[in-house]
Amino acid sequence: MPKAVPGITYTKDEKSPVIDSPTSPYIIPYYKDESFLNNYESYEKYVKAIERVVRTNDRYSKYIFYLKNEIKLNHCMVLKNVDDNDCDIEMHHGPVFTLYDVCAIVLEYFILKKWKISTTRVADVVLDEHLKNRVQVIMVSATVHEEIHNGEIFINYKQAWGDLAAFTKKYWDAISPEYREQLNRYIDRSLIHDSNDFGILTLNPELTRKKKEV
Protein backbone atom coordinates (compact mmCIF):
# COMPACT_ATOMS: atom_id res chain seq x y z
CA MET A 1 0.00 0.00 0.00
CA PRO A 2 1.40 3.49 -0.89
CA LYS A 3 2.36 5.96 1.80
CA ALA A 4 -0.54 8.00 3.18
CA VAL A 5 -1.09 11.28 1.34
CA PRO A 6 -3.48 13.91 2.76
CA GLY A 7 -6.74 14.03 0.78
CA ILE A 8 -5.99 10.80 -1.11
CA THR A 9 -7.71 7.51 -0.34
CA TYR A 10 -6.46 4.09 -1.48
CA THR A 11 -8.96 1.25 -1.48
CA LYS A 12 -9.06 -2.24 -2.93
CA ASP A 13 -12.08 -4.23 -4.02
CA GLU A 14 -12.29 -7.65 -5.62
CA LYS A 15 -11.57 -6.27 -9.09
CA SER A 16 -9.04 -3.48 -8.84
CA PRO A 17 -7.27 -1.12 -6.41
CA VAL A 18 -8.49 2.47 -6.81
CA ILE A 19 -7.29 5.95 -5.87
CA ASP A 20 -9.94 8.43 -4.74
CA SER A 21 -10.16 11.92 -3.26
CA PRO A 22 -13.04 13.99 -1.86
CA THR A 23 -12.04 16.79 -4.24
CA SER A 24 -11.90 14.57 -7.33
CA PRO A 25 -14.95 14.05 -9.59
CA TYR A 26 -13.84 10.50 -10.37
CA ILE A 27 -11.78 7.61 -9.01
CA ILE A 28 -8.72 6.18 -10.73
CA PRO A 29 -8.73 2.37 -11.05
CA TYR A 30 -5.36 0.64 -11.24
CA TYR A 31 -6.54 -1.96 -13.73
CA LYS A 32 -8.15 -0.60 -16.90
CA ASP A 33 -11.20 -2.08 -18.60
CA GLU A 34 -12.58 -1.87 -22.12
CA SER A 35 -14.82 1.09 -21.29
CA PHE A 36 -11.72 3.15 -20.46
CA LEU A 37 -9.85 1.95 -23.54
CA ASN A 38 -12.81 2.51 -25.89
CA ASN A 39 -12.04 6.23 -25.78
CA TYR A 40 -9.42 6.89 -28.49
CA GLU A 41 -7.66 9.68 -26.59
CA SER A 42 -7.43 7.57 -23.43
CA TYR A 43 -6.28 4.56 -25.44
CA GLU A 44 -3.52 6.50 -27.21
CA LYS A 45 -2.25 8.01 -23.95
CA TYR A 46 -2.32 4.59 -22.30
CA VAL A 47 -0.27 2.94 -25.06
CA LYS A 48 2.26 5.79 -24.83
CA ALA A 49 2.40 5.25 -21.06
CA ILE A 50 3.17 1.55 -21.64
CA GLU A 51 5.86 2.58 -24.12
CA ARG A 52 7.46 4.88 -21.49
CA VAL A 53 7.47 2.07 -18.92
CA VAL A 54 9.23 -0.20 -21.42
CA ARG A 55 11.87 2.36 -22.39
CA THR A 56 12.72 3.25 -18.77
CA ASN A 57 12.88 -0.35 -17.56
CA ASP A 58 16.30 -1.76 -16.68
CA ARG A 59 15.57 -4.85 -18.78
CA TYR A 60 15.29 -2.60 -21.85
CA SER A 61 18.78 -1.12 -21.43
CA LYS A 62 20.14 -4.61 -20.69
CA TYR A 63 18.63 -5.86 -23.96
CA ILE A 64 20.43 -3.13 -25.90
CA PHE A 65 23.64 -4.11 -24.10
CA TYR A 66 23.00 -7.75 -25.06
CA LEU A 67 22.54 -6.87 -28.74
CA LYS A 68 25.69 -4.79 -28.83
CA ASN A 69 27.97 -7.02 -26.79
CA GLU A 70 26.75 -10.59 -27.28
CA ILE A 71 25.10 -10.47 -30.72
CA LYS A 72 27.76 -7.95 -31.84
CA LEU A 73 25.24 -5.53 -33.34
CA ASN A 74 27.49 -2.68 -32.26
CA HIS A 75 27.62 -1.11 -35.70
CA CYS A 76 25.17 0.74 -37.93
CA MET A 77 23.24 -1.86 -39.93
CA VAL A 78 22.76 0.69 -42.73
CA LEU A 79 26.27 2.14 -42.82
CA LYS A 80 28.34 -0.99 -42.22
CA ASN A 81 31.61 0.88 -41.67
CA VAL A 82 30.20 3.00 -38.82
CA ASP A 83 30.37 1.53 -35.31
CA ASP A 84 30.40 2.52 -31.64
CA ASN A 85 33.82 4.09 -32.08
CA ASP A 86 32.46 6.55 -34.64
CA CYS A 87 29.11 7.57 -33.17
CA ASP A 88 26.24 6.58 -30.93
CA ILE A 89 24.57 3.38 -32.12
CA GLU A 90 20.86 3.38 -31.27
CA MET A 91 18.11 0.77 -31.38
CA HIS A 92 15.28 1.50 -33.81
CA HIS A 93 12.06 -0.52 -33.59
CA GLY A 94 10.92 -1.71 -36.95
CA PRO A 95 11.02 -1.39 -39.80
CA VAL A 96 7.43 -2.72 -39.84
CA PHE A 97 6.17 -2.13 -36.29
CA THR A 98 7.29 0.70 -34.02
CA LEU A 99 7.50 0.21 -30.25
CA TYR A 100 4.13 2.00 -30.00
CA ASP A 101 2.69 -0.56 -32.45
CA VAL A 102 4.12 -3.48 -30.47
CA CYS A 103 2.69 -2.09 -27.21
CA ALA A 104 -0.72 -1.58 -28.84
CA ILE A 105 -0.78 -5.14 -30.23
CA VAL A 106 0.17 -6.66 -26.87
CA LEU A 107 -2.47 -4.50 -25.16
CA GLU A 108 -5.08 -5.82 -27.62
CA TYR A 109 -3.89 -9.33 -26.75
CA PHE A 110 -4.59 -8.62 -23.07
CA ILE A 111 -8.08 -7.38 -23.98
CA LEU A 112 -8.70 -10.46 -26.13
CA LYS A 113 -7.56 -12.78 -23.33
CA LYS A 114 -9.56 -10.78 -20.75
CA TRP A 115 -6.46 -10.45 -18.58
CA LYS A 116 -6.08 -7.72 -15.95
CA ILE A 117 -4.65 -4.67 -17.68
CA SER A 118 -2.06 -2.31 -16.21
CA THR A 119 0.85 -0.47 -17.78
CA THR A 120 3.37 -2.59 -15.87
CA ARG A 121 1.70 -5.89 -16.81
CA VAL A 122 1.57 -5.07 -20.53
CA ALA A 123 5.08 -3.57 -20.50
CA ASP A 124 6.42 -6.73 -18.84
CA VAL A 125 5.11 -8.86 -21.73
CA VAL A 126 6.53 -6.40 -24.29
CA LEU A 127 9.92 -6.67 -22.58
CA ASP A 128 9.64 -10.47 -22.59
CA GLU A 129 9.04 -10.35 -26.35
CA HIS A 130 12.23 -8.32 -26.74
CA LEU A 131 14.23 -10.82 -24.69
CA LYS A 132 12.82 -13.68 -26.78
CA ASN A 133 13.98 -11.78 -29.89
CA ARG A 134 10.49 -11.63 -31.36
CA VAL A 135 10.43 -7.83 -31.66
CA GLN A 136 12.12 -6.56 -34.81
CA VAL A 137 14.76 -3.90 -34.27
CA ILE A 138 17.65 -2.47 -36.22
CA MET A 139 20.80 -0.88 -34.80
CA VAL A 140 21.67 2.37 -36.52
CA SER A 141 23.67 5.56 -36.05
CA ALA A 142 21.83 8.57 -34.60
CA THR A 143 21.77 10.32 -37.98
CA VAL A 144 20.41 7.27 -39.82
CA HIS A 145 17.84 6.81 -37.04
CA GLU A 146 16.60 10.35 -37.59
CA GLU A 147 16.37 9.87 -41.36
CA ILE A 148 14.42 6.62 -40.93
CA HIS A 149 11.86 8.46 -38.77
CA ASN A 150 11.71 11.17 -41.42
CA GLY A 151 10.84 8.53 -44.01
CA GLU A 152 13.99 9.20 -46.00
CA ILE A 153 15.39 5.66 -45.74
CA PHE A 154 13.68 2.38 -46.61
CA ILE A 155 14.80 -0.68 -44.64
CA ASN A 156 13.92 -4.12 -46.01
CA TYR A 157 12.29 -6.07 -43.17
CA LYS A 158 14.72 -8.96 -43.76
CA GLN A 159 17.58 -6.72 -42.68
CA ALA A 160 16.22 -6.29 -39.13
CA TRP A 161 17.00 -8.38 -36.06
CA GLY A 162 14.07 -10.25 -34.52
CA ASP A 163 11.58 -12.92 -35.56
CA LEU A 164 8.69 -10.97 -37.08
CA ALA A 165 6.96 -14.17 -38.22
CA ALA A 166 6.94 -15.62 -34.69
CA PHE A 167 5.59 -12.37 -33.23
CA THR A 168 2.77 -12.05 -35.76
CA LYS A 169 1.88 -15.73 -35.43
CA LYS A 170 1.52 -15.44 -31.64
CA TYR A 171 -0.48 -12.20 -31.68
CA TRP A 172 -2.31 -12.59 -35.00
CA ASP A 173 -5.80 -12.55 -33.49
CA ALA A 174 -4.96 -9.32 -31.66
CA ILE A 175 -3.48 -7.57 -34.71
CA SER A 176 -5.99 -5.11 -36.11
CA PRO A 177 -6.92 -5.01 -39.83
CA GLU A 178 -4.99 -1.74 -40.08
CA TYR A 179 -1.83 -3.31 -38.69
CA ARG A 180 -2.27 -6.38 -40.91
CA GLU A 181 -2.50 -4.11 -43.95
CA GLN A 182 0.59 -2.21 -42.78
CA LEU A 183 2.44 -5.52 -42.41
CA ASN A 184 1.38 -6.84 -45.81
CA ARG A 185 2.24 -3.59 -47.59
CA TYR A 186 5.71 -3.54 -46.05
CA ILE A 187 6.41 -7.16 -46.90
CA ASP A 188 5.23 -6.61 -50.48
CA ARG A 189 7.50 -3.58 -50.80
CA SER A 190 10.41 -5.55 -49.33
CA LEU A 191 9.92 -8.30 -51.89
CA ILE A 192 10.37 -5.73 -54.66
CA HIS A 193 12.98 -3.39 -53.17
CA ASP A 194 16.15 -3.80 -51.16
CA SER A 195 17.04 -1.32 -48.42
CA ASN A 196 17.64 2.10 -49.96
CA ASP A 197 18.80 5.49 -48.66
CA PHE A 198 17.83 7.17 -51.97
CA GLY A 199 21.21 8.91 -52.01
CA ILE A 200 20.56 11.00 -48.91
CA LEU A 201 23.55 9.61 -46.99
CA THR A 202 25.81 9.89 -50.03
CA LEU A 203 24.89 13.55 -50.30
CA ASN A 204 25.57 14.17 -46.63
CA PRO A 205 28.77 12.22 -45.80
CA GLU A 206 29.71 14.48 -42.89
CA LEU A 207 26.49 13.59 -41.10
CA THR A 208 27.11 9.87 -41.15
CA ARG A 209 30.24 9.83 -39.01
CA LYS A 210 29.31 12.20 -36.23
CA LYS A 211 31.83 11.72 -33.44
CA LYS A 212 30.74 11.18 -29.87
CA GLU A 213 31.03 14.24 -27.71
CA VAL A 214 33.78 13.93 -25.13
Image: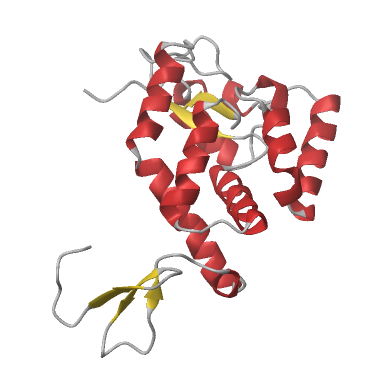
For the image shown, how many numbered marks are present on the structure?
A: 0
Front residue of 78/160: it is: 160
Would residue 116 appear left or right of 66 to someone viewing this image? right
Residue 108 x %, y %: 64, 55
Q: Height in image: 62 above or below 120?
A: above
Give the residue furthest to the front. 14
Q: Residue at x 46, y 46 (%)?
A: 123
Q: Quadrant of the C terminus?
A: top left
Q: Is residue 82 left or right of residue 213?
A: right
Closest to the observer, 136 or 188: 136
The foreground one among 120 and 56 is 120
Asked whether the viewer can see residue 34, the reply is: yes
> Percent x, y for residue 153?
64, 32
Q: Residue at x 86, y 26 (%)?
A: 192
Q: Is residue 175 visible?
A: no
Q: Is residue 189 left or right of residue 51?
A: right
Q: How is the image coloured?
A: secondary structure
* Spot occupied by residue 129 in the image (x, y as percentages of width and height): 55, 34
In the image, what residue occupies the spot 40% across and 34% down? Answer: 60
Quarter of the image with the N terminus in it: bottom left
**Residue that appears at 59% across and 32% down:** 135
Q: Quadrant of residue 86?
A: top left
Q: Is residue 160 above or below residue 1?
A: above
State the image coordinates of residue 178 (x, y, percent, origin top left): 76, 54
